[in-house]
Image: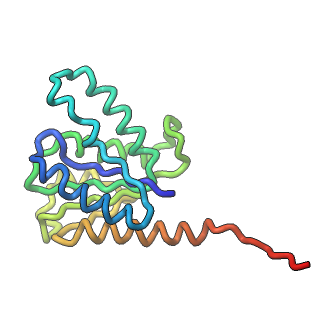
Amino acid sequence: MSLVYLAGAIDYAKEDERNGWRGITKSLLEQKQISSFDPSLAFDFHNTGDLSLVGALRTINNTAMMNSNYVIVYLPKSVSSVGTVSELLELAKFNNSSNKYYASNSVPKVYVVVPDVSDIRQVSAYLLTAIDTTMKLRIGSGALKLAIKEIIDDHQVYLEKSKPEIDYVWQ
């Protein structure tokens, strides 16, 4: 079973900016029996005003992210985000270390999706420096669907490789 962490704007995003892409992604992944972790579902502390929950939520989300098989970092240029960039930096740090704090022995495959630009020169230099060489940058209007397709294809390869070999003994 594979798990995809859905990193993207939450705090400063409008409802459709926060959940629109996540809904599409979850639906496509579920069709292929791939699970997803949506950190926006836990981020309703805005309504309570209790900021003491931020640290706990960040710990939960980082643990889920680092133990995922895949991470989609959805960063439209038109939507402000602080936490998502922070998650991207955490992933880069994790990818470049032998971090023993997480249960997973492998590093998640990271897809950075910037859907509202069509030229790499439109991606901010700050964002480009945060993306390490193990991450895949996808830009343009079809970037999210391309990342999802690549995850589904990779998951299928994993399933094929993990099928047990069965020897039949006929008597």
100 or 126: which is nearer to us? 100
54 or 120: which is nearer to us? 54
The C terminus - image quarter:
bottom right
Q: How many marks?
A: 0
Residue at 16% in and 44% down: 81
Identify the residue at the far bottom of this view. Answer: 170
Quarter of image, res 35: bottom left
Q: Is residue 49 left or right of residue 146?
A: left
Identify the residue at the far right of this view. Answer: 171
Identify the residue at the far front of this view. Answer: 171
Counting from the top left corner in percent of width and height, residue 159 is at 55, 67
Counting from the top left corner in percent of width and height, residue 108 is at 44, 53
147 or 133: which is nearer to us? 147
Counting from the top left corner in percent of width and height, residue 76 is at 15, 57
Q: Is residue 26 above or below residue 80?
A: below
Counting from the top left corner in percent of width and height, residue 107 is at 47, 51
Q: Is residue 146 above or below residue 21?
A: below
61 or 107: which is nearer to us? 61
Q: Is residue 64 left or right of residue 101?
A: left
Q: Is residue 160 left or right of residue 47?
A: right
Quarter of image, res 61: top left
Colour logic: rainbow
Residue at 17% in and 64% down: 115
Residue at 37% in and 70% down: 150
Residue at 40% in and 56% down: 70
